[in-house]
Image: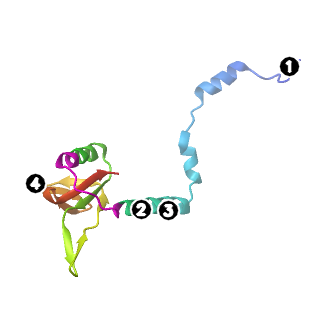
Amino acid sequence: MNKYPHYDPAKRDQFLHEFKDRGMLRWFGFYLSDHSAAIHQQKKLEDTQFAQVHHEQMDFGEIADNVSSALIYNQKVVVEKNITEIKDHEPLESAPVIGFIEGCTELGLVINQQEFIYDEIKYLALI
């Protein structure tokens, strides 16, 4: 006695062979704008917290390796200048900048539309 009289294994195999799963595309509709805004805000907060840490002077070879890796793999970098400002007789270190390397000039790198002279770069790392 057959429980499923219309069952055809050949049709099942044909369906499994021809069915194209869209993968993650079908789940994109479930992201609400509030949820994606919260994800972007969390990422921005993490970047800001990472940028507030001041680092020691890096070797020029390490900086050059990180620059080439950032350009090859199109990754964000955090860059910190070696220059300190004097305000009220107190030295203030410049805030690190996070962004993509947009270009190179004869004197330095362009990151977030700011030019960083090679000799003034204290720290440059991939994010």
Looking at the picture, which amino acid does disc 2 mark? Lys
Q: Which residues are magenta?
A: 51-64
Outermost residue to the bottom: 88
- Quadrant (top left/top right/bottom left/bottom right) for the N terminus: top right
Q: For the residue marked with disc 1, what is the amino acid?
A: Asn
Earlier in the chain: of badge 4 and badge 2, it is: 2
Q: Amino acid at mark 3?
A: Ala
Q: Residue at the spot x=51%, y=62% of the render?
A: 38
Give the number of the mark in front: 1 or 3: 3
Question: Which marked residue is nearer to the observer: mark 2 or mark 1?
Answer: 2
Whether tag 1 and tag 3 are in contact, CB under 8 A, the answer is no
| Residue 51 location (% of width, % of height) | 34, 61
Q: Earlier in the sequence, mark 1 or mark 3?
A: 1
> Mark 1 and mark 3: span between their CA atoms?
54 Å
- On residue 106, the disc is 4
Q: Which disc is residue 2 wearing?
A: 1
Q: In the rendered image, which quarter is residue 32 located in?
A: bottom right
How far apart, in angstroms, are the residues tagged by discs 4 and 2? 31 Å
Q: Secondary structure at mark 4?
A: loop
Horizontal and vertical percent position of residue 43 = 44, 58
Q: Mark 2 vs mark 1: which is more N-terminal?
A: 1
